[in-house]
Image (cartoon, rainbow, N blue to C red):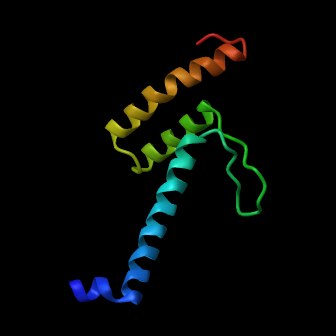
Amino acid sequence: MAELLNDHFAQLVIWLAILAILAAAAGYVLARVRPGARRHGPTGAAQQELTASELMSKFREMHSRGGLSDAEFRTIKAKLAAQLQQELKDNGETG
């Protein structure tokens, strides 16, 4: 082990691995800190964010196809409920 740590090439590989891990962690943290940042599709154009009702429709479809368990679907519904109510309130509807 001591010979490996004294080898300059091995040290370079270790430092590059550490640098890559830190860069990946920084990218993850930035993505989590900036959740409102626009996501870009394959063409480079910004994608429109889906509304809660659109998300609910997609998750309902996934659930009906067996892609989500009952428990997962209930959890998603509970989390989207507040957002959906806010959207309805913003549109002047009641629900």
Seen as rendered, the residue at the extreme left is: 1
Q: Residue at x 51, y 62 (%)?
A: 23
Question: Quadrant location of the C terminus?
Answer: top right
Residue sitting nearer the eye, 25 or 10: 10
Q: Residue at x 52, y 55 (%)?
A: 26
On screen, residue 81 versus residue 51, left or right, reads: left
> Can you give x and y, in whole percent of width and height, for residue 20 in the image?
48, 69
Residue sitting nearer the eye, 32 or 25: 25
Q: Residue at x 59, y 31 (%)?
A: 52
> Can you give x and y, in whole percent of width and height, for residue 82 in the image?
52, 21
Question: Quadrant location of the N terminus?
Answer: bottom left
Q: Residue at x 60, y 42 (%)?
A: 34
On screen, residue 44 above or below 80: below
Residue sitting nearer the eye, 92 or 3: 3
On screen, residue 47 above or below 4: above
On screen, residue 29 versus residue 93, left or right, reads: left
